[in-house]
Amino acid sequence: MVENRPLLDFLTHLVLITGVAIVAFPVYVAFIASTHGTGAFVSGVMPLLPGTHMVENYSMMWNEGLTSAGAPPLWVMMFNSLWMALIIAVGKIAISITSAYAIVYFRFPFRVLAFWMIFITLMLPVEVRILPTFKVVADLGMLNSYAGLTLPLIASATATFLFRQFFLTVPEEIMEAARVDGAGPLKFFRDILLPLSRTNIAALFVILFIYGWVQYLWPLLITTDSNFYTIVMGIKRLAASADAEPLWHYAMAAVMMAMLPPVLVVIFMQRLFVKGLVETEK
Amino acid sequence: MASIHVENVGKIYSGGVRAVSDINLSIADGEFIVLVGPSGCGKSTLLRMVAGLETISEGTVSIDGGVVNDKEPADRDIAMVFQNYALYPHMTVRQNLEYGLKNRGTPRPEIDARVAEAARMLEIAQYLDRKPRALSGGQRQRVAMGRAIVRKPAAFLFDEPLSNLDAKLRVSMRGEIKRLQRRLGTTSIYVTHDQLEAMTLADRLVVLDGGRIEQIGAPLEVYHEPASTFVASFIGSPAMNLMEGELHGDRLAVGPSILNLAGYAPTSGPVTVGVRAEDLRLATSAQESFLLRVEYVEELGSQRLVHGMVGDQPLTVALPLEEALQEEMKLTVEPRRLHFFSRETGKRLTMPGSEPVRSRQVMGAVA
């Protein structure tokens, strides 16, 4: 709607600003909390302006962590989370793009059955199958390991389905032209299909990286060694102390840092992300 | 460059659908063959079997003497031009041209030389570093042809390459394809549903219908001596008039009109009579003639097409602009310009013992 009506302008801005405020205010409070000293947040009056303990809080959390809460330094947990999110994102993309390739471009017995089996697993997220999965992972001796953290989460029906849909939009003639040009299945995949899927891969990477980063239940179950704690479950530990007031300023410093990597991924891949979701390059 | 032999080839899709049956075709080295027919006639299937993109259910295809039934498309030494160009969208024009050569391990200097030559031939040199997205339809089609040319294959296979272009561009590209093929002398098979394209390009036409060959011949031969009512109605624009008539000795009856055939009747009894719009003339009053009730007129500029009815059967006649139009017109035709087809089979009926006169002239003209 291209209209020049000041009242309408004012209203739309009002709605937008209210929305932003509602979303951003808790984040702001978290940031303020992370800059104050001990006790400032439990005194009853919440400060709304930054305090003076920011550097102190952050460096303390980053380097040492809250030993009283049994949490390792933040950099360990951040590293674990980053590693886990990356393995999950890359693994999911690698597995789903190859299985979508098989399903779309090859004729083999039970192809349709295979597709529907993959599709049906959409109905079985981690939470539903968590006990049997835990049992399997435990029996394989993968508790407290990166393999245990990532492998059970790595298969992705959604990504397989998305890649399948994308491959179906690639004109068949391109595949035929490549065959005439002497490209075998692997060459076609590498030279034609992968470059064409670039934006889709980027979009999925953003989604899957964040999916991996925010995993809470699974790491909580299978890690008992604090060296394998991830940041999201670590924060829970920081906030829950049974016999004392939570150390909000430390917990919030951890929260702020935990938010950074997903934000960075989104910011830097935003252009590709949007492109991958809205347009197909053909 | 090579000859191509198609022997008893048939295609049965899984599910038992027969797309193509019993095709026999010998293509000489350097010949330009056009497969033409309506959609679903099996022409593309046949081409794709030669290309190796479809498996061959029956019979054999050999290129340059060797049977290629079980060879991958890449090993058949053919190059193909697709209807929607099928350029690789993420590669530049240069990379598109190079891709097939690279996959064959052609040395770099050779690749560069061939790409440069093809680019010059097709006048796409200035676009070499662009992506296909930034090119117009005609330019993309040139690139698609370039991709075929650089390979220097034994045969070019064209699958309706001009269908996505606008009418004007189609005409100029048609000329260009013909010129290129002459110059390179590469054996070519070209699939189209456009009879005009087929007529203008082909050394020999193959008219297909329902998965079978209806007629093979030089364009003018097919035009002047269609082997069946299908070919008669498919080749030529406007389509040949086909009417139900009856032969009695030397006389032909179409509805109420009677024509004297002066010895050109091949048989007697009910037949389908074919006559081209341009072969009909206005009759002088004394002549035996068809009586045409005019319904509407199409002005083409150089001539006009008059559509009407003879009895209860439609007829179209092409008349020069000088002729005055009337509600009812008397038309006549030289008996030897008439075509007779069997009512039952639709096949052409020829005079017993007669030679196909015009086709000999045509062959002579081409040679």
Image (spheres, coloured by chain):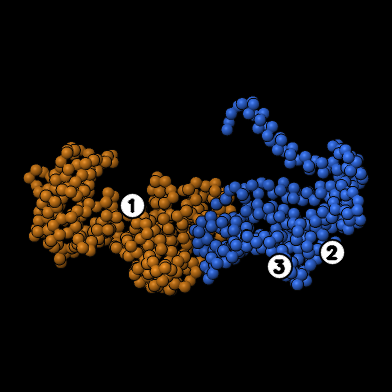
Residue behind mark 1: B196
> What residue sits 63% from the left and 52% below the top?
A199
Residue at mark 2: A225
- Quadrant into which the N terminus of chain B falls: bottom left
In the rendered image, which quarter contains the C terminus of chain B? bottom left
Which label's residue is closer to the chain start, 2 or 3? 3
Horizontally, residue B256 falls left or right of residue A157, namely left
Q: In this view, does B241 lie above or below B33?
A: above
A199 in relation to B19, above or below: above
Q: Do the residues labelled 3 and 1 touch (CB within 8 Å)?
A: no
What is the chain identity of the residue bearing mark 3? A
Which residue was labeled with disc 3?
Answer: A132
Identified by mark 2, the residue type is Asp
Judge left or right: residue A106 versus residue B326: right
| Residue nearest the viewer, comparing B30 with B191 | B191
| Alpha-carbon span between mark 1 and mark 2 | 79 Å
At 21% from the left and 58% from the top, the residue drawn is: B358
Which amino acid, mark 3?
Answer: Pro
Q: In this view, does A108 lie to the left or right of B58?
A: right
Instruction: Count residues near mark 1 (Cα–Cα under 10 Å), then give few for <14, some for 14-19, many for 20+.
Output: some
Q: Are marks 1 and 2 on the same chain?
A: no
Label 2 SS: loop
Q: Nearer the viewer, mark 1 or mark 2?
A: 2
- Depth check, front residue: B258 or B89: B258
Question: Mark 1 falls on what kind of element?
Answer: helix
Which quadrant of the structure image shows residue B306? top left
Which colour denotes chain A?
A: blue
